[in-house]
Image: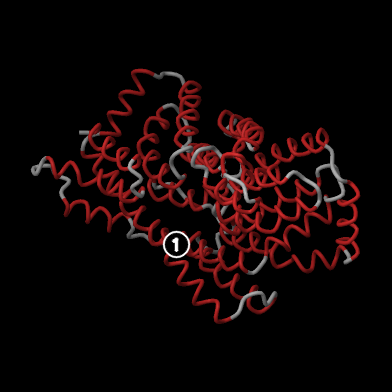
Amino acid sequence: MIGIIFGVFFLCLILGIPIAMAMGFGTIFPALIDPSFQGDLQFVVRSMIKGVDTTSILAIPLFMLSGAIMATGGLSKKLFDVFAVFIGKLRGGMPCAVIVTCLFYGAISGSGPATCAAVGAMCIPFLTDLGYDKTFSAALVATAGGLGVIIPPSIPFIAYGLVTNTSVGDLFTAGIIPGCLIALTLMIYTVVYCARKGEDRGRIESHYNELRSKGILHVIKDGFWALLTPVIILGGIYTGIVTPTEAACVSVFYAIIVCLFIYRSVRFRDLLKFFQEGVKTYAPLGMMLALAQAFMKILVLVDAPQSLADFLSATISSKVVFLLLLNLILFLMGMVLDVGPAIMILAPMLLPFASELGVNPIHLGIIMTVNLAAGFVTPPFGMNLFVAAPMIQSDAMTIGKKALPLIGTYCIALLLITFVPWFSLVLVG
């Protein structure tokens, strides 16, 4: 029965059926071929409703809404100017400022594609004007955009917490150092790349001097409210003032106040459009979350988690071997599955065996998210590649090839995160 469920699921994916519907077909198929099966349609519907009957799930659409408002409000440009004024004159400084902008913007959007779109729309033309190769610029933003799901508030962290009953606040805390580590490794590669390929120092210094002529204090003041966003959201969570869900609600009001009254980059009449787009964007994801809960309940009925644990116990006895195999499987799955659905399907099945080997549930969540985030830039279905490609009138595969060294650098950080739990757990306490 387990083979039939996953066979139907992957067949639907191959046929191009949306992931949510593929999970739905896999969920109801056992009852269709065996009417006596306990997981009938009523069971599936109850599981879907019960699975999303939690306030934690509200954090996802609220963070998505605040990210959309801030993207339109032009916060990515203000963030970039702040970082560029400090490091823009250094070797590889401007591309590094783009990476840091993605890091900070990830703390606003919680989404990889959203970070890539918001930062890329401004930074890719800018880097190209400074003389950097346009394909490299797109590959850099596409790769760094993956930080959007690692730096809190991360939507995949919320999904992992929902399906494994792990503290979302602890996952947010655990994601800070791994996200910074990945950004650091990408910056090191970028500096080496710029040293090898050379830069148009004349153009770079001209723009840098233009930026400095505004005054450092003016640039910081202009970007202050954008820089304050992650401080308010994450500071409220870590100090215990608000829960992650309440922080998501605060982020929406903060985005409206900043963009509407301070930067005046959004109008009142735009708000209704944001709400409508937010519902349209979240509806498929909400359905996917509900179906994922039912899908896992059906897998429990057919003893899939236990069967997986028995198989892994019989074939793997070493924690190191398990982590290496886990990285390989997740990296390959990230090429064909989005990070959210992959976590919702795999996390509840892998957690019991990982815990037996001494892998902390929070550490496992970080490993899974970081691994699957690489899928944003791995061909053939890397979402960020398709977001960045139209910005340079190119195709996704061309950018994907240029991103390969960046992905290799990313994997170095991934191995450190996997085998040195300190990076994930030191701040959790």
Q: Is residue 9 left or right of residue 260?
A: left
In the rendered structure, the answer to whether residue 397 lies left or right of residue 198 reads left
What is the basis of the colouring in this image?
Answer: secondary structure
Determine the image quadrant of residue 195.
top right
156 to the left or right of 415: left
Label 1: how many Cα within 10 Å (few below 14, some 14–19, many 20+): some
**Count the marks: how many?**
1
Residue depicted at 25% across the width and 46% down the height = 25
| Residue extending farthest left | 36
Quadrant (top left, top right, bottom left, bottom right) of the N terminus: top left
- In the picture, which quadrant includes the C terminus? top right
* Towards the viewer: 83 or 91: 91
Question: Residue at the spot x=65%, y=40% of the render?
Answer: 182
Nearer to me, 264 or 45: 264
**Residue 421 location (% of width, % of height):** 57, 33
Closer to the camera, 282 or 304? 282
Task: Judge from the rendering whether residue 420 lies leftward or rightward of residue 134; answer left or right.
Answer: left
- Percent across and percent down for residue 289 are 36, 53
**Most distant residue in the bottom direction:** 268
Q: Residue furthest front?
A: 393
Q: Quadrant of residue 268?
A: bottom right
Asked if 318 appears above or below 78 in the picture, the reply is: above
Q: Residue at x 45, y 30 (%)?
A: 329
- Give amino acid for label 1: Thr
Residue 7 sits above or below residue 427 on the image: above
Secondary structure of residue under mark 1: helix
Residue displayed at 72% across by 50% down? 98
Residue under numbered circle 1: 281
Q: Is residue 155 above or below residue 187?
A: below
